[in-house]
Image: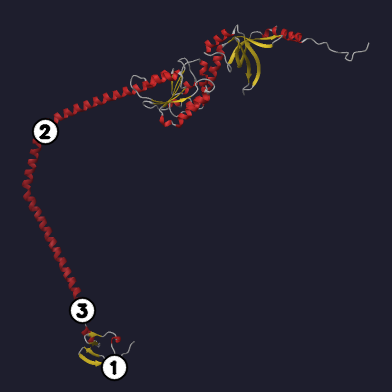
Amino acid sequence: MQPSLFPNKPQGMTLSEFNALISQSINSNPRLQRQWVVAETSDLRVSRGHCYMELIEKDSRGASVAKVGAVIWSSMFPNLNAKFKAATGSDLKTGMKVLVMVTATYHLQYGFKVVINDIDPSYTMGDMERQRQEILEKLAKEGILELNKQLPWADVPQRIAIVSAAGAAGYGDFMNQLHGNPYGLQFYTCLFQAVMQGTQTVPTVIAALDSINRHIDLFDCVVIIRGGGATSELNSFDNYDLASYVANFPIPVIVGIGHERDVTVLDYVAAMRVKTPTAAAEWLIQRGTNALAHLDELQDAVVNAVRDTVGQAREHLAYFTSMIPATARRIIDTNRVKLDNYTRNIPFAANSLIANQRTTLERAIERMNDAVARVLQREQQRLQTLDDKATLLSPMNTLKRGYSLVRKGNACITDAGQLQPGDQVTVQFASGAADATVTQVHQQ
């Protein structure tokens, strides 16, 4: 017999035998039965009454470090989901932190599966509250938690910017309540549309607030409203970015989201939190009616003040009216005495004034005479000086000093160029004159 080429060939087991060993190891291990596990839900879906999902664990950076497929069989899912919703207000869905009781199972044909037997809703609620508290603590540490609450309100906020969904029942309730108020108060509203639930809530609400901020001078306040619903639908409003934006908004923000029992982070940072959209409208109306009441009070105060003033004025007028005759007589008597005194004093005053004026006139005449004498003396001196100069410069005196005067006809000759040979001239001397004929002219 020829020897085998593989003398040590191993003897293998079937796959079903191998799977049976796995099944025995897992299904019989008490540590893998009905254990409470903390995880986050992912890829949750319901099919044929069964709820399928993945349970995952993430590290501090958000990276997945563990994952396992899980199922709630249709025999248990309705009860567990109802229990969870009654406590949290939400159905089970992807992205929730949960505390579930699980059992590890292994089926020869379908493989490994984790079956969820029970759920503790209080853990999920506690995790949601923990996240909310972390956001609030961060806002407080940054010093912005109370900023919007500290903004001043308009006496009557009438120009309202609304952030809501156009077709939402809450928006309709708000508008009906506000514009249908029985006091005839006028409000001016402008809707800035946003998605009010789901993953688009935060970006669309911030975008709406951005649009309002670009026209901030047109509004007195902002109203963010949404009608009631599941508590989980309000989770989007427990968001740091949105809360920070509202806290820093430059005009007061009113938040009316959900029911009275619903509280979100926005309720803590907004200037005013009301329980419903209708309550937001009622609050604005109340501000208006308060202002009207204050105006009525001011009107009454003005009327009363005017009435008191008029009454006092009438009393004063009656008093002064009664005093007029006596006062007039007293004034007339007083002025009559003064007039008599003035009449008696007129002659003395007139004589005194005349004497004073006479003295003043005499002094003025003396000063005038002195001035005239000085002027006459000064002018006489000036005339004598001019006479002396005229005498000194007279032609006769000039001739006496040895000069002579040449005339041609009636004209005095002052330049040799005025004469020609043959001209007849007269030479005037101090003691007489002589006629002469020009024989020759010498120019210098």
Q: Amino acid at mark 1?
A: Thr
Q: Nearer the viewer, residue 254 or 131?
A: 254
Name the kind of residue labelled 2 in the image: Ile
> Residue beneath label 2, please?
324
Q: Can the viewer see residue 53?
A: yes
Determine the CA span between mark 3 and mark 1.
40 Å
Gap between marks 2 and 3 measured at Cα: 87 Å
**Quadrant in which the N terminus is drawn:** top right
How far apart are the two marked residues, 1 and 2, measured between alpha carbons?
119 Å
Q: Along the polypeptide, which appears first: circle 1 or circle 2? A: 2
Which residue matches tag 1? 439
Label 3 neighbourhood size at 10 Å, few (<14), some (14-19), many (20+)? few
Counting from the top left corner in percent of width and height, residue 378 is at: 19, 71
Q: Residue 368's quadrant in the figure? A: bottom left
- Going from N to C along the chain, the mark reached first, 3 or 1, is 3
**Image disc number at residue 388:** 3
Say which amino acid is labelled 3. Asp
Q: How many marks?
A: 3
The picture quadrant where one finds residue 271 is top left
Q: Residue at x 7, y 48 (%)?
A: 345
Q: Position of residue 134 (x, y in %)?
A: 54, 21
Q: Measured from the top left, where is residue 431 in percent x and y?
A: 20, 90
Tell me, yes or no, whether the two marked residues, 1 and 2, touch with CB atoms within 8 Å. no
Does the rendering let one see residue 137?
Answer: no
Q: Element type at marker 1?
A: loop
Q: Are marks 2 and 3 in contact (CB under 8 Å)?
A: no
Please state if 412 lies on the left or on the right of 164 as rendered. Answer: left
**Callout 3: helix, strand or loop?**
helix
Q: In the displayed structure, would residue 362 be above or below residue 219?
A: below
Element assignment for label 2? helix
